[in-house]
Amino acid sequence: MKSLYHLASILLITIVLICGVSCIKGGRCEGALNVNQSEIVVTFKDQATGKYLYSEVNPLYNKDSLEVFDPSGNALVILRVLRVNPGTLSKYWDLSFGNLYNQTTDANSFNAEICKGYILKYKYNVIDTIKVCFKAKNTKCGSKFETLKVYHRGATIRMGTNTTGMQVTVIKN
């Protein structure tokens, strides 16, 4: 009976160790959230017409003319995703930018919420801004934003928790 108990104990310890190691090496932590890979996905609409700024056909602005700059003036990478409007089956571009978290300047976000302003250039002479506020936290296998808030023209567009990004709609006037 003792040997059976001893064998069961060894088996249980082995399972716990394997599960613990798998979290670190290719197990449950594969694809874990990390604020170093954070982004905002934006749908842009025109306030006056309700049209998408970056529609596939007859866009109000060329999707390739959009530029986004961080608070230091650095241009951010913009990714484009073609979406379908289910009501009309017309297509438009969502534009994604990041990285929101900068490990050289945003380490304090693990202690307190920080806010950053981003400059949006629709074209060379049409400029707008959005503000992003976040508080980061470490997780067992990565990190995420405990809170993430996006503001446009002083109004809250969207708030989220326990994430590394979100999708928002910016209404351009």
Image: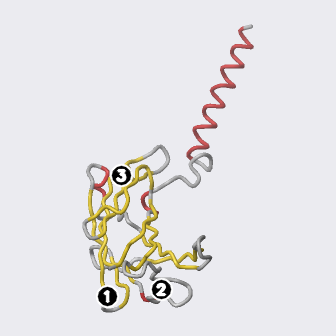
| Res 130 quadrant in image | bottom left
Q: In front: mark 1 or mark 3?
A: 1
Q: Earlier in the sequence, mark 1 or mark 2?
A: 2
- Would you name the residue on which mark 1 appears? 126
Q: Looking at this view, is 97 or 4 the one in front?
A: 97
Return the x and y of residue 143 as percentages of the image width and height: 43, 51
Q: Position of residue 32 (x, y in %)?
A: 53, 52
Instruction: Report whether 116 appears left or right of 14.
Output: left
Measured Cα–Cα span from mark 1 to mark 2: 13 Å
Q: Quadrant of residue 72?
A: bottom left
Q: Which residue is mark 3?
A: 147
Three-letter amino acid code at the position of disc 1: Val
- Residue 150 percent location from the top left of the image: 34, 63
Residue matched to label 2: 63
Instruction: Please tell me which residue is depicted at 34% across the width and 58% down the height of the picture.
Output: 149
In the structure shown, which secondary structural element does the residue marked by tag 3 occupy? strand
Quarter of the image containing the N terminus? top right
Report the front residue among 137 and 169.
169
